[in-house]
Image (cartoon, helix red, strand yellow):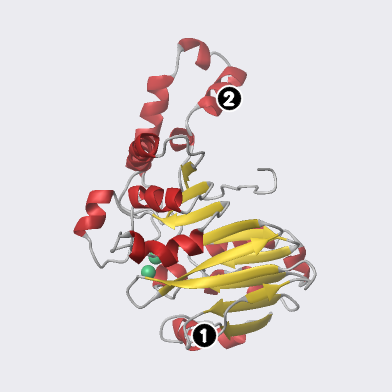
Amino acid sequence: MPSPLLSHHIEEKILKALEMARPEDLQDEASRRNFVDTLPEHVRGCYGGNSACVQLEVGGKNLVFDCGTGLRVLGLDLMEREFQKGRGEVNIFLSHTHWDHIMGLPFFLPLFTKGNRIRFYGVHKDIGERLMNQQDPRYFPVAFSSFTADVEVLTLDGKQSVVLGDEADPITVTWKEMDHPGMSFSYRVEYRGKSVVYATDAEYKKLSPDSLKPTIDFFRDADLLVFDSQYTFIEGVEKEDWGHSSTFIGVDIALEASVRNLAFYHHEPTYSDFKLVNILDKTRKYLAAIGGESPLNCFLAREGKTFDLLAE
Ligand SMILES: [Zn+2]
Ligand SMILES: [Zn+2]
């Protein structure tokens, strides 16, 4: 569910900031500005309340994973660029079509500009029909078929991989089915020896090395793994079959697969930012206890956060 911040969340943040302030921090505008800059990200800002959407810029291409309500915000950003002139191109990969992963689609402005090329990919056989149905006139006033951009919907069913860009300098996308009601798919993108895995809406019920092997192989040596950690470990156990995982399982799997950066993603809408940070602190302690010298870097995914793999 999209989960906007409410007044009491903001009050909590203001109270925390005031608690941290010293008289000299509040003296003038410059000191106040400096003080705000030093506050932790969950106090001065928020992790965001839009549903699933991640953009990856790679080899001159725009890849997007999922069309949750975050896609509307991304659309506004893209419209500041070549998409406004109808010269944009984007490849959108869908993990699955639960509402939180498609409901931003009808509000994606680049779809309404002639000339933009927008390609949707999904592994479900009937992916096109699913997207059209969301915009049936009984549920939404604008039909999927009426977008003015050049739109294509492609099913990946039966294929092994997709290569984007130049054959000599390829961006390769592969996928894997995950354990989630109605099936979801994670995607792995490889480019010039760097790799990113987007793995949301996935439950790992069987944790034996044999059961996890295909997953570990798929995540192997990823420079960045975006990992569904919706619940605390305990809540994840209680909500068996709900199709989500936890930060602790993320750490176990990422260590096993020698992942370098682990982004905890798909936050539970009822968890406050303070609770998310508390879960992250515990998870880092767990990592320190079991990870030995592992350089694994784990953090909370945050709306608007950018991560530069080339600078790594
Ligand atoms: Zn789902
Ligand atoms: Zn979801």
Identify residue type, mark 2.
Arg
| Element carrying mark 2 | helix
Determine the residue positioned at 42% across, 35% down.
292
Q: Nearer the viewer, residue 240 or 253?
A: 253
Label 2 lies in ligand 2 vicinity (Cβ under 8 Å): no
Up/down of 49 relative to 60, above or below: above
**In which quadrant of the rendered view does residue 143 lie?**
bottom right
Up/down of 127 relative to 197, above or below: below
Up/down of 96 relative to 152, above or below: above
Which residue was labeled with disc 1? 157
Furthest toward the front, the residue is 210
Count of labels in the image: 2
**In which quadrant of the rendered view does residue 184 lie?**
bottom left
**Residue 291 visible in the shown view:** yes
Residue 158, percent from left and from top: 53, 86
In the rendered image, which quarter contains the N terminus? bottom left
- Distance from Cα at disc 1 to Cα at disc 2: 52 Å
Residue 215, percent from left and from top: 43, 64
Furthest toward the left, the residue is 238
**In which quadrant of the rendered view does residue 8 lie?**
top left
Give the foreground label among 1 and 2. 1
Determine the residue positioned at 39% across, 73% down.
98
Residue 3, percent from left and from top: 38, 55
Determine the residue positioned at 34% across, 54% down.
268
**Residue 52 visible in the shown view:** no
Residue 291, percent from left and from top: 41, 39
Which residue was labeled with disc 2? 33
Label 1 lies in ligand 1 vicinity (Cβ under 8 Å): no
| Element carrying mark 1 | loop
**Is the residue under label 2 in contact with that under label 1 (CB below 8 Å)?**
no
